[in-house]
Image: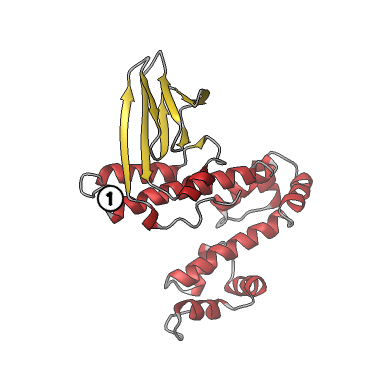
Amino acid sequence: MANPLGHLSFNHIDSATVGTIVYPPGGRYGPRIQQDIQLVLLHTGAMEVTIDGVPFRLEPGNVALLKPGHIEHFTFADEQESWHRWIAVQPLSVDEVKALEQVPFSLPISEHLNRITDLMLSIRSEHADTGPVMRSLGHTAIQLFLSELSKAQLQQDIHPSVLRAKAYIHQTFKENLSLPLIAAHAGVSDEHLVRLFRKYEQTTPIKYVWHYRVLRAVELLSQTGLSISEIAQRSGFQTSYHFARQVKQQTGKTPSEIRTSSWGKGDIYAE
C-alpha cells in the first residue's frame, strides 16, 4: 500500500500532543467526536473502541489509528488496569484526512514507535505542542505508522520461512553464513529455501547475503571514515579483494569511487 501521507508537510500540522494514562478495571470513556489524528498505543489490559456504532478490539502490544469526525466510545478491561499512551496531531488537509479512511485500524507496536512516544513524553514540558519539535515528532510518528503498515501488508504475501531467513541474515550478516545454517533458522530444507527465495525474492539465499553485505558496506563507505579494509571486515567479507569485486559487480563502482562520490571530494581518506 502506498503511503497516503507521503506528501504531508509540517505546515499542515498546527500541533502535536502526547499523553499516557492508566484506566482502572471496568473503565469507560466517551462518547466523543474524534477531533484529530491519534495513535493509541495499548500496553496492558484491553480496549474496545466503538466507532460510529461498530466495535473494534485493541489487544495489548498494538497501536490503533483513530481518524477525525467519528463518534467513539471506549471500554477497558474488567479484570485489570489498562495502560495506554497516545500521540495526536491536528489538523491535516481534507484530502489527507480522506486518504486515512482507507487505513486499517491497528497493527503491532514497533520499538521505533515506542521510542518516539518515549521521547515526546520526556520533552513535552520543555517544548510547546505548537512548536517545531513536537510537530515534527508527531509527523514522524504518523509517517512511521503508515510505513510499518505498508511493510506489514507486503509481508503478508511473502512466505514466513523467507521472512525468518531474511531476519536472520540481517542480524548476522557479519558472520560466516552458510545455506544449511540459514535454512535451519528458517525451519525448512536447503533446497526448499532456495526455491522459496527464487519465488519471492528472485534470487538465492546466498546471493541475498552478499547483496545485503554490499548494501551495509556502501553505507559505511558513504557515512564513515573507516578504512576500506575495516569496512570489508565489518561487512562480512574475508578479504578486501573479494569485497572490492562484489561492490564493483553490484554497484558498477569501486569502493574508492563510491567514497569519493559520496564525500564530494578527492582522496582524503586512508585505505
Residue 1 vs residue 268, the one in the foreground? 1
Image coordinates for residue 251, horizontal then vertical, percent:
63, 73
Q: Residue furthest left?
A: 126
- 119 left or right of 3 in image: left
Q: Residue furthest bottom?
A: 266
From this view, report whether residue 91 is shown above or below residue 243.
above
The residue depicted at 50 percent of the width and 52 percent of the height is 5
Residue 156 vs residue 172, the one in the foreground? 156
Residue 101 in sight here: yes
For disc 1, the marked residue is 130
Residue 165 vs residue 147, the one in the foreground? 147
Image coordinates for residue 58, horizontal then vertical, percent:
48, 27
From this view, report whether residue 21 is shown above or below residue 81.
below
The residue depicted at 65 percent of the width and 41 percent of the height is 156
Q: At numbered mark 1, what does the secondary structure look like: helix, strand or loop?
A: loop
Residue 164 in sight here: no
The residue depicted at 52 percent of the width and 49 percent of the height is 147
Q: Residues within 10 Å of mark 1 (few under 14, many from 20)?
A: some
Image coordinates for residue 67, horizontal then vertical, percent:
46, 38
